[in-house]
Image: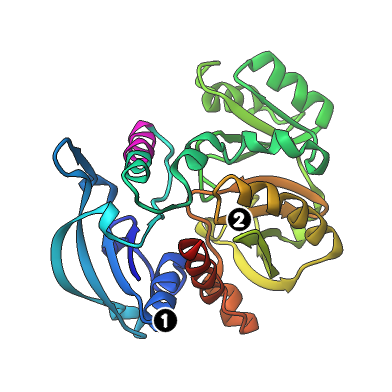
């Protein structure tokens, strides 16, 4: 197959930990052509359809020099076998526009994963409401008074923006924190931006677990991301340490409940965030942690993904 990865600029990807790079390597190992493009080059024209300026990649095992560039060309998305949307957030109007273009490519006959409409319609934070039985006590609002009342009742809360990633702009706020009002006002931009508040979970000390679902099947290992000393956020991007662990019965219960629902919506790859017994986020834009799980357990998550992709393209 010819596979087009829509990713952030190649120079910004770190092969030592980037799941997109792992997926590219796994695809090449199966004999597939690997191409890459950025969202900035996506375009639609009435006489050609949706296109992207792409480069053919040859992947190497050397993490410092993990790719070499081959042919550069403009590809019609309908002319490749699979398009993988792996652009990181922010989920802004340009990201939404990319999903509109990719959805048009689908109408032209392209196969896009995750499906553009599912990416656009699935808020990684608010989607939690559909599965509230697994969630901690949670509030989503822009109302400053409601947020203040939530903190009072919870006593200890986590506040985060709806469109954040990688631990960006996440705050732990206690009811007696002298800065609580300014944190709420700043994060919500004085009530102009929606915020998610969740009760602080003591189980975060054991790690914020990333559980991957691929093609409706649950990866048997989670990556528990453990915060560094003095830090609330466990995200790897915020300096957390990843420890691969087998799924607990509760992990599996959560993942196996969500897996068929999300797969039916065209979400080939999903990353659940679980703290203790609770589901806290459902990530669909560019889930990660494949590299760390393979390094620590030997389980090749990227190869599992390519198998699922091959199956999806054959159906």
Q: Residue at x 81, y 32 (%)?
A: 155
Q: CA distance from mark 1 to mark 2?
A: 24 Å
Residue position for label 2 = 271
Marker count (numbered): 2
- Give yes or no for residue 99 being in the magenta stretch: yes
Q: Earlier in the sequence, mark 1 or mark 2?
A: 1
Mark 1, Cα crowd under 10 Å, few <14 / some 14-19 / many 20+, is: few
On screen, residue 188 above or below 107: above
Please give left or right for residue 160 compared with residue 2 in the image.
right
Residue position for label 1 = 30
Mark 2, Cα crowd under 10 Å, few <14 / some 14-19 / many 20+, is: many
**Residue at the right extreme of this rendering:** 249
Please give left or right for residue 231 compared with residue 43 in the image.
right
Q: What SS does tag 1 mark?
A: loop
- Give yes or no for residue 306 being in the magenta stretch: no
Q: What SS does tag 2 mark?
A: strand
Q: Does residue 125 appear in this view?
A: yes
Position of the N terminus, as image quadrant, is bottom left
Counting from the top left corner in percent of width and height, residue 93 is at 36, 31
């Amino acid at each position: 197959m010819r596979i087009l990865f829509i990713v952030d600029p190649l120079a910004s990807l770190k092969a030592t930990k980037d799941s997109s790079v792992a997926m590219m390597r796994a695809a090449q190992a199966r004999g597939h052509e690997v191409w890459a493009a950025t969202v900035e080059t996506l375009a639609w024209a009435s006489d050609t359809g949706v296109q992207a300026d792409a480069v053919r990649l040859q992947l190497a095992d050397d993490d410092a020099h993990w790719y070499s560039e081959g042919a550069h060309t403009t590809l019609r998305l309908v002319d490749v076998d699979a398009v993988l949307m792996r652009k990181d957030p922010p989920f802004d109007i340009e990201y939404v526009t990319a999903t509109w273009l990719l959805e048009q490519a689908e109408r032209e006959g392209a196969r896009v994963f995750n499906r553009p409409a599912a990416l656009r319609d699935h808020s990684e934070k608010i989607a939690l409401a559909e599965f509230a039985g697994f969630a901690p006590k949670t509030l989503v609002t822009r109302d400053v008074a409601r947020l203040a009342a939530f903190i009072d009742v919870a006593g200890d809360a986590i506040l985060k923006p709806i469109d954040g990633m990688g631990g960006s702009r996440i705050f732990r706020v206690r009811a007696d924190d002298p800065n609580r009002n300014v944190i709420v006002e700043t994060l919500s931009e004085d009530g102009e931006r929606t915020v998610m508040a969740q009760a602080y979970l003591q189980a975060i000390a054991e790690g914020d677990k990333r559980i991957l679902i691929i093609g409706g099947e649950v990866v048997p290992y989670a990556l528990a991301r453990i915060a560094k000393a003095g830090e609330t956020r466990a995200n790897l991007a915020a300096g957390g340490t990843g420890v691969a662990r087998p799924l607990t019965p509760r992990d599996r219960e959560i993942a196996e409940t969500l897996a068929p629902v999300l797969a039916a919506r065209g979400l080939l790859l999903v990353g659940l965030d679980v703290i203790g017994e609770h589901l806290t986020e459902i990530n669909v834009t560019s889930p990660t942690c494949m590299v760390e799980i393979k390094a620590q357990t030997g389980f090749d998550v990227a190869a599992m993904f390519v198998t699922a992709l091959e199956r999806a393209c054959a159906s």
